[in-house]
Amino acid sequence: MSETPPDERPSDGREEPPDGRPSANGEEPVDGDDTPPRDGHRVLVPVEILRGEAVPDAVVEALASVSVVVLGYHEIPEQTAPGQARMQFEERAQNELADVVGAFEAAGAPVTSRLVFTHDPMKTFERIAVELSCDSILLLRAAPTIDRLLVPIRGNVNVEHIVGLVGTLVAGTDIEVTLLHVASEPEAVDDAEALLGSAAETLAGIGSEGERIRRTVVVDDRPLETIAEVAEDHDVTVVGESRPSIRDRIFGDPSELIAERSVGPVLVVRRPYLELDEE
């Protein structure tokens, strides 16, 4: 039986599981979801319950074609035991979580939910994404409408799963997709154009109309800054995880720039699913 890392252990040495029973080893166990994800994709949507965070209607509609796990979470002070927070806030939190789940159900998405009280939301996101086999995690932002979606493509090892997810999300919609590659030197442009051309063909094969797929190659030695700049003109950005953890990719320095400057939500595809294409 593994131990909970010291930085994840609450003040009383125990973190409250979803059913309210503290586990023996201090971890918060999460039952796996045995239901096969719709079209092979399951998105984790963390929502800061009790803080007024909402999932925009446009996001609910966009995710209706995939399986969704709504993670209602509430960050608590280090000195507060999760069990204590649950006793105080659970009823209100469950009511708010039920409203979010109901919105996804009304949109037709297969949806499950979890409620956690945690000292470390980022670590909780990462752990639950692994335990519930979520291939991506959504960082919420305002999204009045979703008309333009940005997909930075950094190399062919991550194309198949990212493009498959994007194709599932936009199939049958009017959403425009921009496939972007940032080349470090002019000599790499031809290869980049071929890479994006292949990705565009895959998207079209899934159901996205060809005229709604744009391909953009930019030569710049600042790839993250370039992606962030282009993301400002799009409603949602879909990126592949380039480091071992969601914590590093979403909340670490590289992707923090993208997330902070993006107008809309950022959907991060987890690295283990991208590595399926590596030989």
Image (cartoon, grey):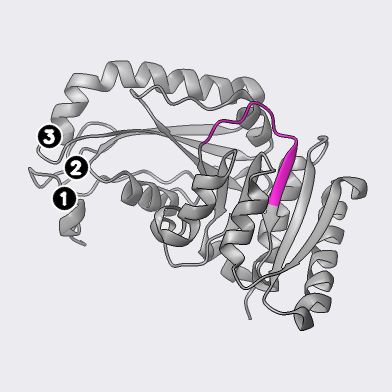
Q: Position of residue 243 (x, y in %)?
A: 46, 67
| Whole-number angstrom distance, CA of label 1 to CA of label 3 | 12 Å
| Number of numbered discs | 3
Residue at mark 2: 15
Say left or right for 137 vs 29: right
The quadrant of the image that shows the N terminus is: bottom left
Q: Position of residue 269 (x, y in %)?
A: 57, 55
Q: Residue at x 64, y 45 (%)?
A: 232
In the depicted view, which residue is nearer to us: 247 or 9?
247
Relative height, residue 171 to residue 159 (above, below):
above
Secondary structure under badge 3?
Answer: loop
Q: Residues within 10 Å of mark 2 (few under 14, many from 20)?
A: many
Residue at mark 3: 80
Could you say which disc has been placed on residue 9 in the image?
Answer: 1
Secondary structure under badge 1?
Answer: loop
Q: Residue at x 65, y 68 (%)?
A: 154
Secondary structure under badge 2?
Answer: loop
Say left or right for 156 vs 203: left
Check contact, mark 2 vs mark 1: CB within 8 A.
yes
Of the numbered discs 2 and 3, the one sitting upstream in the chain is 2
Q: Position of residue 20 (x, y in %)?
A: 22, 31
Q: Residues within 10 Å of mark 1 (few under 14, many from 20)?
A: many
Relative height, residue 162 to residue 54 (above, below):
below
Stretch in magenta: 141-150
Q: Is residue 160 magenta?
A: no
What amino acid is labelled 3 in the image?
A: Thr
Q: Residue at x 69, y 43 (%)?
A: 233
| Whole-number angstrom distance, CA of label 2 to CA of label 3 | 11 Å
> Which mark is nearer the camera, 2 or 3?
3
| Whole-number angstrom distance, CA of label 2 to CA of label 1 | 7 Å
